[in-house]
Amino acid sequence: MSYCDIQHTEEFFIKPESRVAQLDTSQWPLLLKNFDKLNVRTTHYTPLPSGCNPLKRDIAEYVRTGFINLDKPSNPSSHEVVAWIRRILRVEKTGHSGTLDPKVTGCLIVCIERATRLVKSQQSAGKEYVGIVRLHNAIESEIQLSRAIETLTGALFQRPPLIAAVKRQLRVRTIYESKLVEYDPERRLGIFWVSCEAGTYIRTLCVHLGLLLGVGGQMQELRRVRSGIMGEKDHMVTMHDVLDAQWQYDNNKDESYLRRVIFPLEKLLTSHKRLVMKDSAVNAICYGAKIMLPGVLRYEDGIEINQEIVVITTKGEAICMAIALMTTAVISTCDHGVVAKIKRVIMERDTYPRKWGLGPKASQKMMMIKQGLLSKHGKPNESTPDSWKKEYVDYSVAVKKEAEAPAAIAERVPKRKRETESENEEAAVAPSSPATLQPEEQSRKEKKKKKKEKKAKEAAESEGELMEVVGSWMVPQSSRPTSVAARHHLYTPPCDTYKTRDTCSVCPCMLLLSSISIELQHCKPQYS
């Protein structure tokens, strides 16, 4: 059968099929969950033995890079609770996700050592509370209270209560959602739930609620049920649990309790969009290098410019928090450029090996430094061969020159009218070059400096004269100046109009002395 006959007899089309994913990552932990659904830029990279999965860190490192979702007890302050945790776990540094008043209970995220780098982002995250409000007088019905609570949503003005240890200034806080849970008309107590912005005072909200109803009200109890992404149902533990877990490890060497109480810091970042980097790029980012597109392996859908994202390794470790400079669509279509700007580095330096400076040119440069053909900083010296000077391009110097050129142009723009006219006349005779601009700029700066010094000198002299005048009226007659010139300088009025007056009330001396709160009236003295 010929080739043409085969084409006519057979039906050629792409059949629909349902391909089952080879790897189900829906149950993978932390930042690796559903990583197979991320967009793939490339799958080619060299895996390195450094680093490990956050759940498999050794116990000392696990504690140092973890946090506790603590159920804060009533009466002690947040600062006291955090200090107790630091003492129990014997660590150097702890921090919390937002202050709770002493009488308030509930969710308090306590970050330990390395995880304290995430404290600021957790403090600004949204919060949820359940509170009890007591009304001073009875109201018509439960519906009236429910409507009043739902009215107090959106951006609201608040002033911190007297009990708060902050500056009492007016501020705007947003209430995202609120609802009434239950109301007891006999005791005039209402239970409500509210989701709000960080820094909202529920005590002030209860006072506003009473004013809105026209009966007055105050907060009775309060409990925080969520802070950021961690709620009271997300493995919340008490102070006793932390103490028991540390006791078990100290006495029985059983670290399973500590691993149940403390969670890796990556758990706080599971709501962020992810960017997976190659192992060879990890340490460079820890040292502050730009997050470039060639180092990206996978990226998530829905990334927008200026959105906060998390950069992770292939083992699921958080490298840093970053601000996206490319959208998902741009990342998929480009092959170079800066993907994101580092906001906060989380990983320790040198957790992964250094993988920069290993190219052919960099290796040759290191060899020449060892042989003395280049200085210790890689700069040419008298022993450097001419071939290297011609071939090697120092990109840092070239970038610096390009960056300096616009600055020089910017300095030339703001000029006076006379200067521009004179320069235009000179330019008609001979066009100026960039090399001749520098001496002109220096001379201009010197003139400005001399002018400033002259003004300062004149100001100092006038101040000295003022002090002489003041001193002459404060000292006795015997210590006043004896020379005619000095007496004339100190006492003679500047014009003839003052000679006919007994007192010179508008004398310049009077005006000067009044500025330093000295009341003085003087007559023109007579000298023999």
Image (cartoon, rainbow, N blue to C red):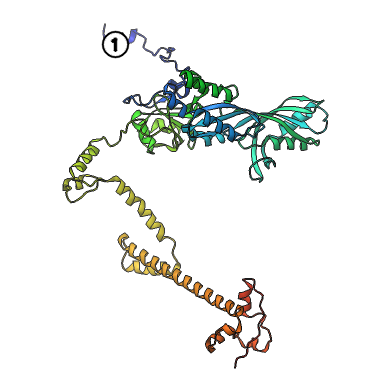
> In this rendering, does residue 508 appear at all?
no
In-front residue for pair 102/108: 102
Query: Which residue carries the number 1 mark?
Result: 4
Give the quadrant of the C terminus: bottom right
In-front residue for pair 119/30: 119
- Relative to residue 50, is residue 344 depicted above or below? below
In-front residue for pair 378/241: 241
**Residue 361 x, y percent position in the rendering:** 23, 39
Residue at image coords 51%, 22%: 247
- Relative to residue 224, is residue 448 depicted above or below? below
> In this rendering, does residue 250 appear at all?
yes
Query: In the picture provided, is 221 more to the left or to the right than 41?
Result: right
Residue at image coords 31%, 67%: 430
Three-letter amino acid code at the position of disc 1: Cys
Q: Residue furthest top?
A: 1
**Residue 519 x, y percent position in the rendering:** 67, 75
Residue at image coords 61%, 81%: 476
**Residue 91 x, y percent position in the rendering:** 48, 31
Query: In the picture provided, is 251 more to the left or to the right than 512?
Result: left
Give the quadrant of the N terminus: top left
Residue at image coords 67%, 32%: 103
**Residue 314 x, y percent position in the rendering:** 39, 25
